[in-house]
Image (cartoon, rainbow, N blue to C red):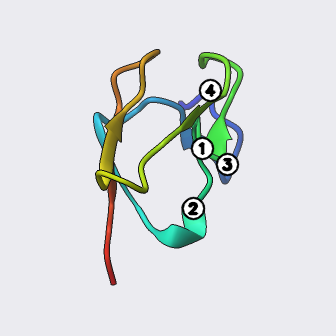
């Protein structure tokens, strides 16, 4: 049984997230993630290098180019 609210993603459940320009400005945890057990929202600069690591949870974000 999951503690997450139906329709949300468990925060920090993965180590790598693929994001698109639609997700910018990027922040961790992202919209749609269950926030009750997560860290404070932090904005991440991904535009220049195309990847970034969250300083709180270590999740890696990769910007997909389409």
Q: Is residue 15 left or right of residue 12?
A: left
Q: Position of residue 33 (x, y in %)?
A: 62, 41
Q: Is residue 2 above or below residue 30?
A: above
Q: Which residue sits at x=45%, y=68%? A: 20
* Nearer to us: label 3 or label 4: 3
Q: Earlier in the sequence, mark 2 or mark 1?
A: 2
CB of mark 1 within 8 Å of CB of mark 4?
no
Disc 1 target residue = 30
Q: Which label sits in the foreground, 4 or 2?
A: 2
Q: CA distance from mark 3 to mark 4?
A: 17 Å
Q: CA distance from mark 2 to mark 3?
A: 9 Å
SS type, badge 2? helix
Q: Which residue is mark 4?
A: 3
Q: How crowded is the residue under tag 4: few (<14 C-alpha within 10 Å), some, or many (20+)?
A: few
Left or right of residue 15, residue 56 in this image: right
* Disc 3 element: loop
For mark 1, give the secondary structure. Answer: loop
Q: CA gap, disc 1 to disc 4?
A: 18 Å
Mark 1 touches mark 3? (CB < 8 Å): yes
Mark 2 or 1: the one toward you:
2
Residue at the disc numbered 2: 23
Q: How many angstroms separate mark 1 from mark 3 (CA)?
A: 4 Å
């Amino acid at each position: 049984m999951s503690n997450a609210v139906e329709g949300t993603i468990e925060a920090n459940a993965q180590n790598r997230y693929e994001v698109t320009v639609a997700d910018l400005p990027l922040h961790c945890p992202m919209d749609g993630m269950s926030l009750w057990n997560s860290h404070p929202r932090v904005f991440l600069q991904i535009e220049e290098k195309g990847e970034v690591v969250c300083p709180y949870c270590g999740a890696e974000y990769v910007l997909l180019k389409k």
